[in-house]
Amino acid sequence: MIRFPPKTMIPSSTTRTAAKTATSNILRRTNASSSSSKSSSKISTIIFDVDDTLYDVSSGFTAHRNGDIIWKYMVDHYGFESLEAARKLRDEYFAIYHSTAKALTVAQTEGKFPKNCTKTFDAKHMSQYWVDHCDYTKLWGNHCYSSEEESKKAKRDFCVALSKCPAKLVAFSNGPRAYVTKVLDTLGYLELFGTDRSSKDGSFVWGVDDVLPHCKPEAEAFKCIFDKLEAMDNQTKIRPEECIMVEDSMKNVRAAKALGMKTILITGSKEEHRILEEDAPLTDDPAVDVAFQTVEEMATKLPGLWKDPPVFEP
């Protein structure tokens, strides 16, 4: 079983007066006093968030999925009287839980769904709705690249590079698993998270429905993933200090750092599409070990991850 450090309070970014806008090709280190920076740089596992991390926030895909798509779903399946009523409730609870699946689960438990609703919210049903109704062509949008083809090429090149990384690669999202698998498959990354990196079995892909009632940034959500990894290979003990969390969310970066993990913040190429203003990237935050605009920069700026064994050398 994983033993975590004592739970620490994760500071809210709302207490900061302003979020600093990320500039291109950012590579910054946190304070040398960070306890995790003094620990071993050996890396066994790299855990990737998916939304706004493996594709760019500037694409608008997340705003699309968590906007008109989810509002219509709530109206059609749970009897909300209007798209605006659905938006108001979803946004209120999402700001607390940072996961639509958990947000709507809790909202219904607290009696916030329409009184005439007879259906119990089902994260897997919502996931399939996203699979069937989202416009996945939006995933290729990225202000760092001049065209969709250039964006696709960057993804292909990064996939080839990651396929050669000796670390265990894991995808862990606050989105439900079927939807997450669809995104990874569309981007061409799904095979990276299979048992042998030549299949698309998604053995190392987990969504929020795999850890509910928890979700990121709760420590229990990370613990669920570590326990699952250990259960798949009982010869391997997962040590948080040997793991990297690759994230766009400041909440989740701080949570990962509090558990002793290394952190990579993906800032994105533009700010205006970010749903939660308080989650805007702060590259000088003590919880951030290194920050990039795009996830693809890892391949050239952290070459230590391709050593055998991999090491974190920001």
Image: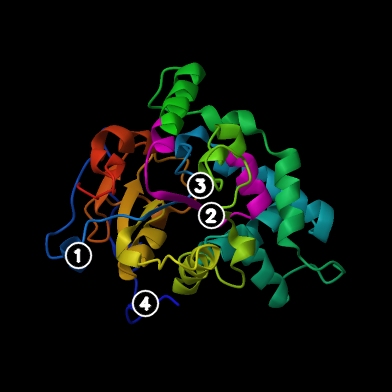
The amino acid sitting under disc 1 is: Ser
The amino acid sitting under disc 4 is: Phe
The amino acid sitting under disc 2 is: Ser
Asked if residue 263 lies left or right of residue 233, the reply is left
- Local SS, label 3: loop
User: Above or below — where is 147 with respect to 249?
Assistant: above
Q: Which residues are magenta?
A: 161-184
The alpha-carbon separation of the residues under discs 4 and 1 comes to 15 Å
Tell me the mark number nearer the camera, choosing from 1 and 3. 1
Q: Mark 1 — residue? A: 39
Near mark 1 (Cα within 10 A), the count class, few <14, some 14-19 or many ≥20, is few
User: Above or below — where is 296 with respect to 180?
Assistant: above
The alpha-carbon separation of the residues under discs 2 and 4 comes to 21 Å
Q: Mark 2 — residue? A: 173
**Residue 181 falls inside the magenta stretch:** yes
**Residue 63 falls inside the magenta stretch:** no
